[in-house]
Image (cartoon, grey):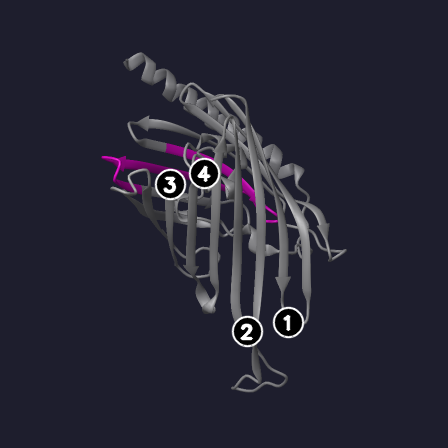
Amino acid sequence: MLKTERRYVKDFIVAVCILFAISFACAISIADEIGTEDAAFLKIDAASRPAAMGGAFVGVANDVNSVFWNPAGLTQTEKRELSAMYNSWFAGINYGSGAYSQRIGNAAVGLSVIYLQSEIQRRTDDTEEADSTFNAYSMAAGISGSYALIPKVFSLGGTVKLIDQDFDVEDSNGTALDLGGMFHISKLNIGGSVQNIKLHSSLDDGSLPLGIRAGISYPFVSEGIIAAEFSKQGAADATYHIGVEKWFKKILAMRLGYCLGSGDNPKEGFSLGLGLKAYGTKPMENMNFQFDYAYVPEWDGLGDTHRISMMVRF
């Protein structure tokens, strides 16, 4: 048994090395487009569980949150899942997400939405009191599909997103595509995704923040996962993530993560969170509920955030 565990640890270390090698290639391949990106809200990480794990989730992707990170992971779900998350941010900015997924044989489908809303003051002169206020918002709604080409071994998935933004004097809309893959080798999961591939935009000279994620996860103990990930969002420098999750008696989960930015990317620091599960009784014995909380410290100078989400499996 000890030899087996050592082999898995060796495989994990080798996979980490491969991941970092791929990350450098990806970082070089994406051209800088500073100042031309539209829909910057797409770079905000959705959902509480992945945020608590430091953003290391593309190689985990085993619940409905996969629609935001790696749609190929939807084939790992067993029941129908519904989730909603809310985050009250700095300066009165409200951010939220919601998602639904359902297995259909060796395939799975999902629906998702993310939004960012804030009330902004309007001024014509340099005055203490605002002349008026207006409601600014950004939203992306998506439909996802995933299929296990080799059940329990290899899956592919994609998401088509409709994007809409309203900033008082300027509106914009468009469509984008996410693509993802998930590969299982023994206990090791390897995942990758390309996000926000521009299909159409009402802004001719704007581009979407193209994102690349590559990651791995490994169940290092019973009901426990360790994950590592590389990500690059738009013109920003690459970010490296590592996260750990451990469930106790399938009721309480503790999560810890660390995010490290490279170059001029200021993202760096720990994140943490917890999860609680409750199992339904008659007449809802086929349902279970999960509460997730994530605390993410001040990144990008935007202040601490507390994310709260609820998930229902039925």
Q: Quadrant of the C terminus?
A: top left
Query: In the image shown, does 16 or 57 lie closer to the viewer?
Result: 57
Magenta-span inclusion, residue 57 = no
Q: CA distance from mark 4 to mark 2?
A: 33 Å
Query: Label 4 crowding class (10 Å Cα cut-off): few <14, some 14-19, many 20+?
Result: many
Q: With respect to residue 206, does 151 lie above or below?
A: above
Left or right: 119 as drawn, with respect to 36: left
Residue located beneath label 1 in the image:
168
**Dot 3 amino acid type:** Arg
**Dot 1 amino acid type:** Asp
Residue found at x 67% / y 49% = 175
Query: Label 2 crowding class (10 Å Cα cut-off): few <14, some 14-19, many 20+?
Result: some
Residue 146 visible? The answer is yes
What is the x, y in percent for residue 234?
61, 48
Residue located beneath label 4 in the image:
57
Total of numbered circles in the picture? 4
Q: CA distance from mark 1 to mark 3?
A: 39 Å
Q: CA distance from mark 1 to mark 4?
A: 35 Å
Helix, strand or loop at disc 3? strand
Pick out the residue farthest to the right: 204
Helix, strand or loop at disc 4? loop
Q: Quadrant of the N terminus?
A: top left
Q: Main secondary structure of the magenta part?
A: strand
Residue located beneath label 3 in the image:
313
